Amino acid sequence: MSALPGRIDSIPMRRVYLDHNATTPLDPRVLEAMLPALRQEHGNPSSIHGFGQRARAIVEDARAEVAALVAAHPTDVVFTGSGTEADNLAVRGVALAAREGRRKIVYAAFEHHAVVNTARALGREGFPVEAVKALPGGQVDLDDLAARVDDRTALVCLMLANNETGVVQPVAEAVALARRHGALVHCDAVQAAGKLPVDFAALGADLLALSAHKIYGPKGVGALVVRRGTKLEPLLRGGAQERNRRAGTENVAGLAGFGAAARLARCQLGADAARLAALRDDLEARLLAIPDAQVNGGAPRVANTTNVSFAGTDAESLLMALDLEGLAVSTGAACAAGAVEPSHVLRAMGLPMARVQASLRFSLGRDTTAEDVALAASVVARAVDRQRAAALARR
């Protein structure tokens, strides 16, 4: 914040960003990796001349790095324009390729909207669609999943780590259950990659979604990892890019960034997770010192995320008050048609609506410091006190 003209007492506001699950800042090392492609490697990766082949080498180097991040084979990686597109390609692509009599889609009720809304759209188109309940701690209810998966099921969707609570899901167990009925499994790993080890083969899933801007890469680039032999109908028709699974000229500079971000995430995973877990636990302890504060979601969780409710407050108003003081967090709510929808994740966990509407998500990142945590906690405590006092005065 710059000082106003004529003012000598203006002090720049210290801003703290604790919304890394929404997006991460571009790592300077990632930007450096992107610059050559932005400045000079303008060839089309599908062209056979030298310009095109240099661009193709960048794309394939990125494919190898993204594959290594999740212990997959490079040929299994399909590049997309986002994690949302990857989820859409997985859910709709499998549904459209499914044979008659096996068209049912089963998904966890707390999935990202990219999965939830795609499944619901398929339901309106005549596909059988069922949502699975969550347990109060935030994990999928495996008993409910078992009751819904049958021999008509084409696809089971279960994310690896939830974007709002950070809760890690029992994907391997869900895969074993799905396999008993011959169903495929799609795993949205957008919030897990770079935060915990992801092994595509060990998980056993057939499809896995990733996004560059969640791991300090550029926006507008994602990937769907597809197990060989998985039948998948492409969403985009055109050229033969991505082995006929996603038409369109690849975003060469964006993929250079994705590859660099994937490499850094893999190399720094252990150190980043340990540091962030300590900072998250410190922040959580400070926030729980505020009267009537509660954590939403239980263990296991990714290291950087906590979701906390503050009884007697309104999260939307609280978020705006915090933003005015330089603290960026999230409610986890989604805006649709101009209206704010209370978190479908917390509602799926069975939390009372008053608690859902008083909850904030805090997600830390590489740039978060101990000083940021201390400042954030004090700002939240003051804002909660002010809002509660104002509510009391109105009674």
Image (cartoon, rainbow, N blue to C red):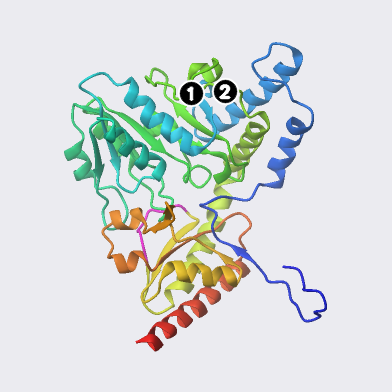
Of residues 309 and 201, the one drawn nearer to the viewer in this rendering: 309
Helix, strand or loop at label 1? It is loop
Q: Is residue 46 above or below residue 138?
A: above
- Eyeballing the image, is 342 above or below 378? above
Residue 158 image-quadrant placement:
top left
Q: Quadrant of residue 294?
A: bottom left
- Kind of element beneath mark 2: loop
- In contact (CB < 8 Å): disc 1 and disc 2: yes
Mark 1 highlights which residue? 236
- Left or right, 110 with respect to 288, comes to left
What range of the chain is rendered magenta? Answer: 295-302
Magenta stretch contains residue 301 = yes
Residue 92 is situated, as x and y percent measured from the top left of the image, at 37, 29
Residue at 37%, 57% (x, y): give it: 343
Would you say residue 205 is visible in this rendering? no
Decide: few, some or many residues near mark 2? Use Cα within 10 Å; few <14, some 14-19, many ≥20: some
* Residue 239 place in picture, x, y as percent: 55, 16
Instruction: Residue 355: name its quadrant.
Output: bottom left
**Residue extending furthest left?**
147
Residue at the image position 67 percent from the left and 70 percent from the top? 14
The residue at which mark 2 appears reads as 248
